[in-house]
Image: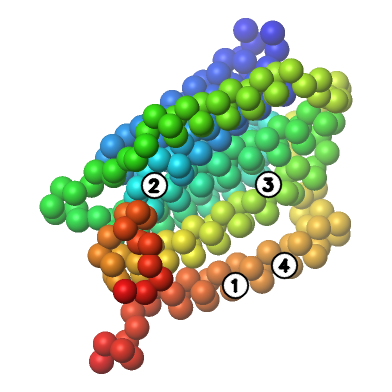
Amino acid sequence: MTLYDIVFYFFAVITVISGATVVMSKNIIYSAFSLLFTFFGVAGLYVLLNADFLAVTQLLIYVGGILVLLLFGVMLTNKVINVDMKTGVMQTWPGAIVCGMTTGALVVIFMATDWNIVREEVTMTSTTHTLGEMFMTSYLLPFEIASVVLLVALVGAAMIARKDTKSEA
Amino acid sequence: MNIGLSHYLVVSALLFGFGLFAVVTRRNAIMVLMGIELILNSSNINFIAFSRFNGMKMDGQAVAVFVIILAAAEAAIALAIVLNIYHRFNTVNIDEVSKLKE
């Protein structure tokens, strides 16, 4: 067991256990907070995979943005005072069987496939410079489209979420 | 046994399974959104793991950035829709919201 292995198993266990808690917990607040640990664990895995820029992005966008947004959604759509935070489940066993079989099939395929791995030592360097160059050269069009998508999503979300003042007045 | 590609793939498969379970069985719309976030995260682990074990080619990481961007846009739009549904139907139970208008 090298240090790398220990750190990997640490983050993998954090990710999987908190991911399970997200799904199994009856209280939606608990789910939202264990989602925080899942995102942290995944960010740790990114660091182990030499993706430092993506790990920081994961923390900024998922933990700082999406999770806060989800918590706002939980707070605004559940009756916190009435302690009505339980989220119902339906058809747990058929769903569990189907999801378990899908996951099992995926794991078997992942283990059985002979992946074409390039076996060479990778030195840990900062990926930010390379990624920035890629976004300005070979990925320029997707990058611009992504910016337009974000703008449209911003306008659309504000448009959808605001109160319809005309009909109420 | 050294930590290789398949270790990361198994972690991502487990996350995918949990996310799928949340999407399929949960009634609360916000829980369904959390399941989708789990699925997107698992796909991102796959992208970055393949990029790392393919001689550190950076294309996987570039795609992962786009996945994060789309996840952010999706979360914003979906929560706006959920809030609107809550105002109109007074519930976020996706079983009860089966009509486009009242």
Label 1 vs 4, first from the N-terminus: 4
Q: Are marks 1 and 4 on the same chain?
A: yes
Q: Are marks 1 and 2 in contact (CB under 8 Å)?
A: no
- Which chain does the numbered disc 3 sit on? B
Residue A78 % position (x, y): 25, 55
- Amino acid found under the numbered disc labelled 1: Leu
Q: Is residue B66 left or right of residue B14?
A: right
Image height check: is A107 above or below B35?
A: above
Front label number (4 vs 2)? 2
Tell me the number on the disc at residue B31: 2
| Spatial separation of the CA atoms under disc 1 and disc 2 | 26 Å
Chain under callout 2 = B
Residue B29 lies left or right of residue B75; in this view the side is: left
For the C terminus of chain B, which image quadrant? bottom left
Q: Please give the residue where the numbered disc 4 appears in the rendered image.
A: A145
In depth, the one of A40 and A25 nearer the eye is A25
Task: Say yes or no: labels 1 and 2 on the same chain.
Answer: no
Eye-nearest disc, 1 or 2? 2
Label 2: few (<14), some (14–19) or many (≥20) C-alpha neighbours in 10 Å? many
Which chain is home to disc 1? A
Instruction: Give x and y (percent) for residue B57.
Output: 83, 38
In the rendered image, residues at marks 2 and 3 fall on the same chain: yes
Say the numbered circle drawn on residue B76. none
From the image, tell me which residue sits under label 1.
A151
Precedes in sequence: disc 2 or disc 3: 2
x then y, percent, for residue A40:
49, 36
Badge 2 marks a residue whose secondary structure is helix
Vertical placement of residue B72 versus B21, above or below: below
Q: Type of residue at label 2?
A: Met
Label 3, on which residue? B64
Q: Is residue B13 above or below residue A77?
A: above
